[in-house]
Image (cartoon, rainbow, N blue to C red):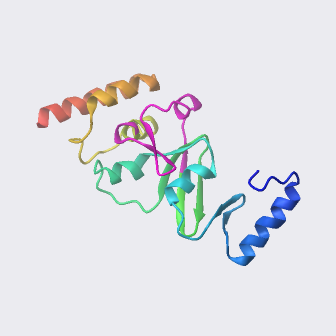
Amino acid sequence: MLWGEPSSEAVRVRLNYYVKQGNLFRIRRGLYAKDKNYNKLELATRIFTPAYVSFETILSKEGVTFQFYSQIFVASYLTREITIDDQLYSFRKIRNLLLMNSIGVELKDESSLATKERALLDILYLNTDYQFDNLDGVDWEKVFEILSVYGNKRMDKKVKELYQHVLATR
């Protein structure tokens, strides 16, 4: 589509030429970048689509958990672990109904990223008992708004417990 070529073979040849010339960097089959300084969060959401960065990646970035994770965690329609350029991408499967619902997912720098409230709920969706380090910066109004999308009684109960704990420690 980029070059207006009707033949996929001609496109493949042209891509190989640009890779050999150093004008393109082949990241993975079907994915190319101008150089090795590509946005890894953007790549995470392009490997398998639809997808968005969530879970521990967002929670540690936002200070909700203090544990450092070098891998990038992604909500997707399948579960896989892939290493590209020494970066581990962990894809975790969530229901399509949740994956396709964009509430609490923002587009930043060509990457789909969960808000900390959505990432918190995504973690609780997959883990029955998860320990959070700092819930002070969480907007509980947003959490309860997004929670309705999950339709999960276990999560409803856990979120109410977490909220009561936060209120009790203030």
Residue in the image at 57% along x and 71% along y: 36
* Residue 70 appearing in the image: yes
Using residue 4 as the reference point, say whether residue 123 is left or right of it: left
Q: Is residue 75 above or below residue 9?
A: above
Labels in figure, total: 0
Residue 108 magenta-highlighted: yes
Q: Is residue 135 above or below residue 153?
A: below
The quarter holding residue 29 reads: bottom right
Q: Bounds of the magenta span?
A: 91-118
* Residue 158 appearing in the image: no
Using residue 168 as the reference point, say whether residue 85 is left or right of it: right
Q: Is residue 112 above or below residue 149?
A: below
Extreme-front residue of the structure? 4
Residue in the image at 26% along x and 33% along y: 162
Residue in the image at 35% along x and 60% along y: 68
Q: Nearer the viewer, residue 139 or 19?
A: 19
Q: Nearer the viewer, residue 49 or 150?
A: 49
Q: Position of residue 113 (x, y in %)?
A: 45, 45
Residue 25 magenta-highlighted: no
Q: Position of residue 100 (x, y in %)?
A: 56, 32
